[in-house]
Image (tube, rainbow, N blue to C red):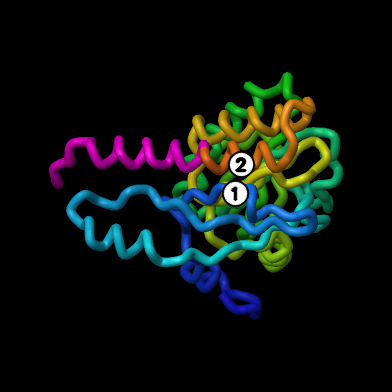
Amino acid sequence: MNSQTPSRRGLKAGVIVTLVVAVAAAAGYWSQRRLAAPAAVATAPAPAAPAAAAATANVPAAQPVVPEVLPGFALQDRDGKLRKLAEWKGRPLVVNFWATWCAPCRREIPLLNQIRAARKAQRLEVIGIAVDFREDVLAYVKQRPINYPLLIGEDDGLEALKSVGMTAAFPFTLFADSQQRIVALKVGELHQDDLDLILDRVRDVDSGQLDLPGARARISEGLKELATKRALKSADAPATADG
């Protein structure tokens, strides 16, 4: 996507939706000022194409450069009020970037609703960042409940993507501690076990049981293990007959 203002068709058709890539933050890539997320960990491809799988595994992935703390961009909420992530300082945050036309993004919403309710004791807040056309987002939320704060932006939403070092590859999610330091980046659809792993480590950081490098290293290894288990389970599942 170039820096020009996209048309409605261009925004929806030109964005690559990441479906099977999990990005975990490796400790060696996190510095005091900037966090460079490590290479993506892809789920295992179809068993019928082992050669393609090996080739894909050897292709270096582009490294997003993630800021040390959540950026200060401002986007409108559902009521048109400008909001900043800094308003939620003092609470751990799940900042989920999505769009209405993105199928895995839509699948995540019930899980995000659930995790917000389940983690009340942790004072967790989920913030949805819809990089999409405002009318589309407002129409969507009339049909499906989103029980957490929602910020919406078109061109300014694309600028918000740049501020976190990402392109429009949806969905992706940032996890921050109560000081708004970014603990992890997860690219691709969230799963319950991903959330439990990351949010438990965020809790450990907030309670002083873990420092940031330790939490990031554990999350990195844990996400790789979960992605591998998921891939093996998918590969072992019986093929579904067409038609």
Asked whether residue 235 is drawn in magenta, I would say yes
Query: x, y (%) of residue 140?
Result: 56, 46
**Residue at horizontal 41%, vertical 66%?**
59
Name the residue that disc number 2 marks. Answer: 217
As drawn, 183 above or below 118: below
Tags 2 and 1 touching, CB below 8 Å: yes
Q: Is residue 138 visible in the rendered structure shown here?
A: no
Three-letter amino acid code at the position of disc 1:
Ala
Q: Main secondary structure of the magenta part?
A: helix
Q: In screen coordinates, is 114 left or right of 94? A: left
Q: In screen coordinates, is 128 left or right of 197? A: right
As drawn, 149 above or below 20: above
Three-letter amino acid code at the position of disc 2:
Ala
- Residue placed most toward the observer, 142 or 46: 46
- Res. 150 image quadrant: top right
Q: Residues within 10 Å of mark 2 (few under 14, many from 20)?
A: some
- Quarter holding the N terminus? bottom right
Q: Residues within 10 Å of mark 1 (few under 14, many from 20)?
A: many
Disc on res. 26: 1
**Residue segment shown in magenta:** 222-243
- Residue placed most toward the observer, 110 or 216: 216
As drawn, 167 above or below 101: below
- Res. 87 image quadrant: top right
- Residue placed most toward the observer, 191 or 213: 213
Query: x, y (%) of residue 220?
Result: 56, 43
Q: Is residue 87 visible in the rendered structure shown here?
A: yes
Disc on res. 126: none
Query: x, y (%) of residue 241?
Result: 13, 42
Q: In screen coordinates, is 4 left or right of 20? A: right
